[in-house]
Amino acid sequence: MTEIRICHLYPKEMNIYGDRGNIAVLQKRLEWRGYSSTLTSISIGDEFTPTSFDLCYLGGGQDRDQMIVAYDLQEKSAALHSAAKDGMVFLWVCGGIQLAGVGYTDSEGRRIPGVGILDLDTSAGKSRLIGDLVLNAELNGDSCKVVGYENHVGRTFLGSDATPLGAVLKGHGNNGEDRTEGAVQRRVIGTYMHGPILPKNPWLADKLLSWAIEHKTGKTPTLTPLDNSLENLAQQVAITRAGMKR
Ligand code: GLN
């Protein structure tokens, strides 16, 4: 049985919006298709070995939480870059997308260094961008509506090496100005979408899983279709709550 190895970075410090739910979705959708998975928590002072994992997850955190983990993340930077270059899948959420970039200047003007696996930079704005978020996401030429919830003061702007995860249909997105949301580079995805994001976005969950299986086996899998009726209903409720028709 193929085993997919998931790493959860700083699960204690960076997990403010039920981000653990994303891990549960990934493991369950693997299990339903006959794959096994392992979950390893990597915290401050632990070694991150780039060849040990297929997917690396980092959840959201307030400025204070980001400051706590940022300097430890710098210690892991070379290994993270090596993993990203080797095609490991990353899903880093909100505070995570900010730490995946070059850095984040917080509301007090303090600079929190990022690791730079995404070509982007973030500075705190004057107000928080909060609310339901609906976007038209695009990955590998395939597109789908993706919904989530955002709550961030950071304004993120992408450099030329990163492409947006999608175009904002409803909500603020990366910076409330350019109608982009998230960032993608190789198999690294950063997004502001909490929720957690994956339970009501099976399309995105399966994209990540296809990439992770390909990273482990070297072959592009054909994932057995699952009954997503509950997930699609949850997405529809979120789209309606955002004030949009399907
Ligand atoms: N501290 C960051 C901001 O407020 C991210 C917050 C979060 O992870 N929700 O922009």
Image (spheres, rainbow, N blue to C red):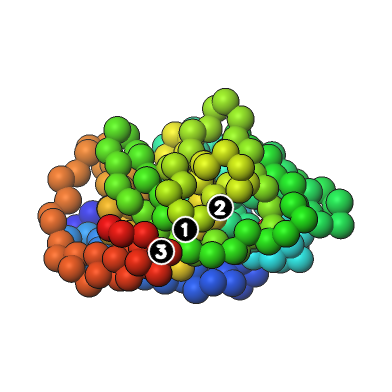
Upstream in sequence: badge 3 or badge 2: 2
Report the image quarter containing ligand 1. bottom right
Residue at 30% across, 47% down = 144
Question: Does the residue at mark 3 contact the one at mark 1 (Cβ under 8 Å)?
Answer: no
Q: Secondary structure at mark 2?
A: loop
Q: Quadrant of the C terminus?
A: bottom left
x, y percentage for residue 219? 22, 37
Looking at the rendered structure, the kind of residue marked 2 is His
x, y percentage for residue 136? 37, 45
> What whole-number distance in Å separates the C-alpha atoms at marks 2 and 1?
7 Å
Task: Answer left or right for 120 relative to 149.
Answer: right
Q: Which residue carries the number 1 mark? A: 133
Residue at 54% across, 72% down = 17
> What whole-number distance in Å separates the C-alpha atoms at marks 3 and 1?
10 Å
> What whole-number distance in Å separates the C-alpha atoms at marks 3 and 2?
14 Å
Up/down of 217 relative to 30, above or below: above
Looking at the rendered structure, the kind of residue marked 1 is Leu
Looking at the rendered structure, the kind of residue marked 3 is Gly
Upstream in sequence: badge 2 or badge 1: 1
59 or 218: nearer the viewer: 59
x, y percentage for residue 7? 47, 59
Q: Which residue carries the number 2 mark? A: 172
Q: Residue furthest top?
A: 160
Q: Is residue 204 visible?
A: yes
Figure label count: 3
Question: Does the residue at mark 3 contact the one at mark 2 (Cβ under 8 Å)?
Answer: no
Q: Which residue carries the number 3 mark? A: 243
Q: Quadrant of the N terminus?
A: bottom left
Answer few, some or many: residues within 10 Å of disc 3's Cα (few below 14, many 20 plus, some between 14 and 19): few
Upstream in sequence: badge 3 or badge 1: 1
Question: Does the residue at mark 2 contact the one at mark 1 (Cβ under 8 Å)?
Answer: yes
